Image (spheres, grey):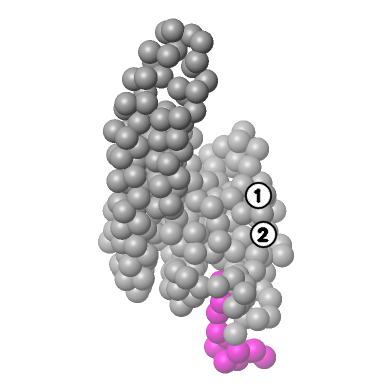
Amino acid sequence: MGRRGQENIFDVLLRLPWWASLVAAVAVFILFKYLVPALALGNHFLVMLAGGLKRAAPYIAIPLLAIAPAAYLRRLLRRRFLGGQADLDSLCAMSWQQFERLVGEGFRRLGYSVEEKSGAAQESGIDLVLRKNGATTLVQCKQWRAKQVDISAVRQLYDVMVAEKANDALLITTGRFTLDTVAFATGKPIGLIDGNALLELVQSVQKAGPNALPTSVPQPSCHVCSRPMVRRRARRGLRSAGEFWRCSAHPSCKATRAV
């Protein structure tokens, strides 16, 4: 897939919650308007520099402040975009950029802090970095339209995970994984999320909604591989018509638990 160019502070703030831009704008204004001039007293050169920064403070803060509504609108559109996905065909029809955004928004709703990688950082092939409860998970949205993802992809992800000293990793596709890929990932802290598992994950967060309270029905982590679990309804067996949690990395991880 294509790679994005180097990002700047505006790109970073645009990805963060809208209030981060507001905090940045206020902090910059106070720093340049009051703190720098106060610290520059006694040094002629620094006084001149501080005077320029003091005059420029509003012009630096205003662009940062303007990012807040843009960031809010961006998050709102992503939430609506995720809510509009109904089947695998809609997942396969999107661009790779949309696919990454969809995955990122899905994990945000599961309570993860999501960092979208870009520029030089993407040379490693990592698209997202998830953080939750002190653990770091690397995510690669590899060959999102591929019918099958072979073992080379999971080997590369494993090498990057070890090099980055991450806790675990996820390889996500709308297709399926070859038997060799599943065999390689088995027993390693790598989750394989195929098209069906991804659709289940998307549907589970759609039902929860973007403002679901964590005290309602908490989204558990898999007790085997620590991946997020998705809520399913059994169609047959002893739990027929009942609900249960299943690991989102199914079928590479077959862990389940009662609701």
Residue at point 54% right, 64% down? 110
Is disc 2 placed on a helix, strand or loop?
Answer: loop
Is disc 1 placed on a helix, strand or loop?
Answer: strand
Residue at point 62% right, 54% down? 132
Place of residue 117 in the rendered image (x, y in percent of width and height, measured from the top left): 44, 41
**The magenta stretch spans residue 240:** yes
Q: Looking at the image, which is closer to me, 28 or 41? A: 41
**What is the span of residues highlighted in magenta in the rendered image?**
230-242
Q: Mark 1 points at which residue?
A: 135
Label 2 packing within 10 angstroms: few (<14), some (14-19), many (20+): some
Residue 4 placement, left or right of 31: left
Residue at point 42% right, 14% down? 47
Q: Name the residue under label 2.
A: 226
The three-letter code of the residue at mark 1 reads Ala
Place of residue 165 in the rendered image (x, y in percent of width and height, measured from the top left): 65, 38
**The magenta stretch spans residue 54:** no
- Residue 237, placed above or below residue 97: below
The three-letter code of the residue at mark 2 reads Ser
